[in-house]
Amino acid sequence: MAHPFAAKRGRIVGDDVVADMVAAGLFALEADHPDHTDDQRERALSLAADLGIHVTGSSDYHGSGKPQGLGARTTDPAVLEALLAEPTYRGIVRP
């Protein structure tokens, strides 16, 4: 789930919504995102640990309109390997 607590983007979801999504099969929660404050990042890390799911990161780079560069925040390679090993993984979608 991408940037769940980035309040500066608008509405955020509650921890209960994330828990419901985990029950439905959510694999990971994005904590390392440029729009998360340190407190929001810590909240995401703590919630992911409590729910037993993985943590991802993202630079959320969409071109020159973003202040951070490509690769500013990354996902641990071990998390990527775990995702690729998931029985529900259906491949990377490319345009």
Image (cartoon, grey):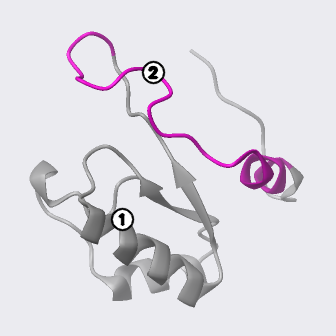
- Point 65% across, 28% down: residue: 93
Whether residue 36 sits left or right of residue 55 in the image: it is left
Crowd rating for badge 2 (residues with CA inside 10 Å; few <14, some 14–19, many 20+): some
Crowd rating for badge 1 (residues with CA inside 10 Å; few <14, some 14–19, many 20+): many
* Region of the chain picked out in magenta, as a range: 63-84
Q: Secondary structure at mark 1?
A: helix
Q: Give the image location of residue 57, x and y in percent.
A: 51, 48
- Point 26% across, 71% down: residue: 39
Q: Is residue 45 magenta?
A: no
Whether residue 87 sits left or right of residue 14 in the image: it is right
The mark found on residue 41 in the picture is 1
Q: Give the image location of residue 91, x and y in percent.
A: 77, 36
The mark found on residue 22 in the picture is none
The type of residue carrying mark 2 is: Leu
Whether residue 90 sits left or right of residue 43 in the image: it is right
- Point 65% across, 83% down: residue: 52
Q: Nearer the viewer, residue 84 or 95?
A: 84
Q: Is residue 82 magenta?
A: yes
Q: Which residue matches tag 2?
A: 70
Q: CA distance from mark 2 to mark 1?
A: 19 Å
Q: Nearer the viewer, residue 1 or 67?
A: 67
The type of residue carrying mark 1 is: Arg
